[in-house]
């Protein structure tokens, strides 16, 4: 029995040794081999070259887009709130910086032209008159949407531009520009544009048909139009001469002709312009009576005479 026990011990010992050998072999088999660094490095270099090639292709694609196709700018030139803003391409037509906004008809936005070139006097061009009106409105108008808001230059039609003769109340020369618009009905501004050292000076007179009485005739002289045909009360009897005068007002569609006489000069035929009339002349002498205005219908019949108009101030103050 003792012999049997010894054999069993030897058998167990041999089994254990064999197991150790097998475990050692398995441990070597499952042990990870060393990291293939050279292969990984080669793969990384290849991937980097591929990315560089793609980036270069993308840059060449961007370079093919016209310069200025898109611009990126933050609120104050920073990068905090950048947004992509489309810009016209280099080959697309565009207005120069600072130029007026273009209308569908291709003309610059601004006031409408007068019906006749004769309404632009004393060498004043339409561009000068339009610029004077625009700057005058920008200077004299109240806040947008308020009762004092006079609107923009493109809301108006210029019906008269003429040299301005300064007086003791408003010295300086320059010119007047009269702009009218449809809303409210009969609304107009007379802008005084005076060149000053370091820039222009502007004054404005505003009026509308709302100032008219209920029983007006087919011709209505501007109730505050004296700014154009008289000098300051302080200069009464001592006006600067020669004096460029102007007269404006509204007319009904039935009126075909309006004439204005002032001083010893003969009657001047006024221009009729979209429901308005405008006349001008040169005065070479001191006067005490306001301009004499007459209106005629298509048949030549007299339909208005300022001498018979009880609302018209015939005598100058």
Image (cartoon, rainbow, N blue to C red):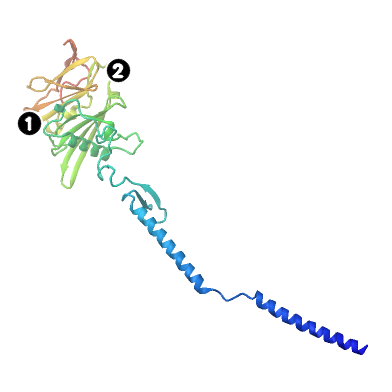
Q: Nearer the viewer, residue 310 or 212?
A: 212
| Image x and y of residue 308, in percent | 18, 14
Q: Is residue 81 above or below residue 206?
A: below
Res. 77 image quadrant = bottom left
Which quadrant would the C terminus be assigned to in this image? top left
Query: In terms of depth relative to the viewer, which is nearer, 230 or 217?
Result: 217
Q: Residues within 10 Å of mark 1 (few under 14, many from 20)?
A: few
Q: Quadrant of the N terminus?
A: bottom right
Which element type, helix, strand or loop, lies under badge 1?
A: loop
Instruction: Please state the total of marks drawn on the protein image.
Output: 2
Pointer 1 residue: 242
- For residue 49, which quarter of the picture? bottom left
Q: Is residue 103 above or below residue 22?
A: above
Query: Which badge, 1 or 2, is on the more N-terminal residue?
Result: 2
Name above or below for residue 259 compared with residue 118: above
Residue 291, given in percent of the width and then of the height, sits at 14, 22
Residue that numbered label 2 is attached to: 214
**Label 2 environment density (alpha carbons within 10 Å; few <14, some 14–19, many ≥20):** few
Q: Where's residue 20, x and y in %?
A: 74, 82
Residue positioned 8% across, 27% down in the render: 283
- Residue at point 69%, 76% (across, down): 26
Q: Nearer the viewer, residue 223 or 313?
A: 223
Q: Residues under labels 1 and 2: Cα distance? A: 37 Å
Can residue 317 be seen?
A: no
Give residue 272's position: percent from left, percent from top. 19, 21
Q: Residue at x 37, y 47 (%)?
A: 85
């Amino acid at each position: 029995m003792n012999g049997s026990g010894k054999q069993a011990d030897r058998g167990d010992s041999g089994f254990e040794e064999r197991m150790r050998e097998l475990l050692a072999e398995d441990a070597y088999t499952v042990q990870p081999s060393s990291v293939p660094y050279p292969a990984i490095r080669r793969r990384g270099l290849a991937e980097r070259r591929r990315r560089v090639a793609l980036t270069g292709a993308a840059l060449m694609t961007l370079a093919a887009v016209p310069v200025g196709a898109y611009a990126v700018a933050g609120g104050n030139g920073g990068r905090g709130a950048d947004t992509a803003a489309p810009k016209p391409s280099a080959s697309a037509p565009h207005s120069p910086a600072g130029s007026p906004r273009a209308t569908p008809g291709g003309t610059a936005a601004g006031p409408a032209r007068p019906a006749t070139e004769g309404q632009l006097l004393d060498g004043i061009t339409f561009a000068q008159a339009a610029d004077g009106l625009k700057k005058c409105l920008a200077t004299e108008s109240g806040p947008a949407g308020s009762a004092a808001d006079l609107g923009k230059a493109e809301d108006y039609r210029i019906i008269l531009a003429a040299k301005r003769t300064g007086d003791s109340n408003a010295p300086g020369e320059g010119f007047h520009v009269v702009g009218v618009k449809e809303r409210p009905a009969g609304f107009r501004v007379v802008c005084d544009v005076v060149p000053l050292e370091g820039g222009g000076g502007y004054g404005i007179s505003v009026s509308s048909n709302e100032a008219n009485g209920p029983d007006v005739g087919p011709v209505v002289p501007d109730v505050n139009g004296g700014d154009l045909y008289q000098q300051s009360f302080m200069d009464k009897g001592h006006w600067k001469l020669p004096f460029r005068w102007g007269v404006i007002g509204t007319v009904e569609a039935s009126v075909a002709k309006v004439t204005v006489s002032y001083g010893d000069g003969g009657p001047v035929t006024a221009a009729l312009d979209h429901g308005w009339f405008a006349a001008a002349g040169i005065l070479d002498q001191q006067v005490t009576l306001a301009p004499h205005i007459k209106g005629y219908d298509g048949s030549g019949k007299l339909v208005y005479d300022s001498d018979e108009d009880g609302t018209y101030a015939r005598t100058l103050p």
